[in-house]
Amino acid sequence: MSATPPTPSQPAGGGRLDPRDLARAKRDAMAVRARRIRRWVAGSALTLFVVAFLIVYVQLASGHDPALTANGERRAASAKAAARKTAVEHAKAERERESSGSGSTEAQTGSSATESESGTSTESEMGTSTESESGTAGESESGTSTESESGTTGESEESGPSSLRTSQS
Amino acid sequence: MSAETVLRFDCFGGSCGVYVEGDGGDESAAQAAARVRTSLLLWHRRFSRFEQASELSRLNADPRERVPVTPLMGRLAATVREAAEITGGLVDATLVPELVAAGYERELPPVLPPALSVALAPSRRPAGPSRERRWEQIVPEARGVSRPPGLMLDSGGIAKGLFADELAATLSTHRSFAIDCAGDLAIGGAGEVERLIEVESPLDGSVLHTFAVRDGGVATSGVLARSWLGADGRPAHHLIDPATGRPAFTGVLQATALAPSASLAEIHAKAAVLSGPDGARRWLRWGGAVVLDDLTLEVIEPAASKAAAGPALL
């Protein structure tokens, strides 16, 4: 039968443990454990930070900043909402000018649903609906995105290429 | 002939428009027009100098020498450099501090009536390049832009021309299209349809001249559309003379340039205004129109680059 080797807190010659030695041994053991936990937490946090930093860094360095697109979309949407009234009025004025200028140009409806949402009289003046399969489809396809909700726009389909104006901007 | 889809909307501090006729590939004219409108509205925010969170503002404020940017921002930086190279530094989009000093800190500065602006303007002289030549320090790279920290870019008309060209490239399979970026136009299409382009008077909005264009770009630049009274009591506007760092009064009120692309048209129109009456015509090699300080109109027809003096406007 082999004897159990003495622990560090046991005197080599056997016998009863000194309570002070025992207490010191326990304190040492707790200190070792606390250091181990502390090191593990610090190491994990550092590793996590470095990994997250590298992911973000690589993403931004590659020129793909997701915040740019998201912010841009939100801002474009709010800008449209704010400018809805004036823009529709502007579009109406544009159409009136074009129709009075060219005489034969007919403004026809493109997206009745969207325009009626805007609550203006634009679409009723624009009248009818011969063409609007493509117009409506185009609008409704992207209609889920804020951009095609066309609050800022006047829309029409016209026959032949429109003349354009260039001016100082 | 199929109908043309037209979308008009407010953007770039003015009125923009998209005109598309005919399907292109899998995309209908209406879908293409909606897509172009969406892009312009997004890019307006991304490239605005007046939005602190815009990509342009963040690039301008970035303390690093080399800044990673999106591909489109890289192309804008390249176009800014190209504009200065083409014009020998006359069209210089690095004059942001000078613009701010002149009072152009907000998107819509107070407007000075054109007649008053002309009356109060100081003596006329052609603009010249800046001695600093800051634009030479812009180095567009694959995924970034290198420039000394503190050197700022102004998007201005150059960006509008660039955006019109970028989107025009995506519409080339449609029968006919036009993109109007607040006066900067890109025109084209597979059908080579001729489109009439009216040049607007800077004074009263009347039509001064009409060009017929099948393909390419048209842009107008001038000193009256955005003018205001500066802190020194003198009229100011957004076209800075690089040599003096102050708003340029050269004797040309407005120049319209035709060119193979909208961005080239924008660069040449600006250069024509900054060059003054004697030098304006050499920037209109593809055609254009110039309104001089004495309110006369000179038209350079696209086919013959020969200037014809028009009637006095007043």
Image (cartoon, helix red, strand yellow):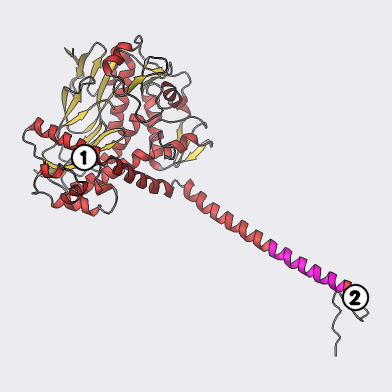
Is A46 on the left or on the right of B115, as rendered?
Answer: right
Q: Residues within 10 Å of mark 1 (few under 14, many from 20)?
A: many
Identify the amino acid type marked 2.
Asp
Q: Residue at x 31, y 14 (%)?
A: B276
User: Mark 1 falls within which chain?
Assistant: A
Q: Quadrant of the C terminus of chain B?
A: top left
In magenta, the rendered stretch is A21-38
Residue B210 got which mark?
A: none
Residue B239 magenta-highlighted:
no
Q: Determine which of the numbered discs, if any, sits on residue A18 in the image.
A: 2
> Residue B193, image x and y in percent?
14, 36
Q: Position of residue A69 (x, y in %)?
A: 38, 47
Spot occupied by residue A90 in the image (x, y as percentages of width and height):
21, 35
Disc 2 to disc 1, C-alpha distance: 93 Å
Work out whether disc 2 and disc 1 sit on a shared chain.
yes
Q: Residue at x 29, y 13 (%)?
A: B118
Residue under the point 31% across and 31% down = B263
Image position of A2 with respect to B311: above or below: below
Label 2, residues with CA under 10 Å away: few <14, some 14-19, many ≥20: few
User: Disc number at residue A88?
Assistant: 1
Position of B160 compared to A102: left or right? right
Up-down relation of residue A4 to residue B190 (above or below): below
> Which of the marked residues, 2 or 1, is nearer the chain's N terminus?
2
From this viewpoint, which residue is outermost toward the left?
Answer: A104
Q: Nearer the viewer, residue B249 or B101?
A: B101
Of helix, strand and loop, which one carries label 2? loop
Q: Say left or right for A5 vs B130.
A: right
Q: Residue B198 occupies which quadrant of the picture?
A: top left
Who is closer to the viewer here, B109 or B27?
B109
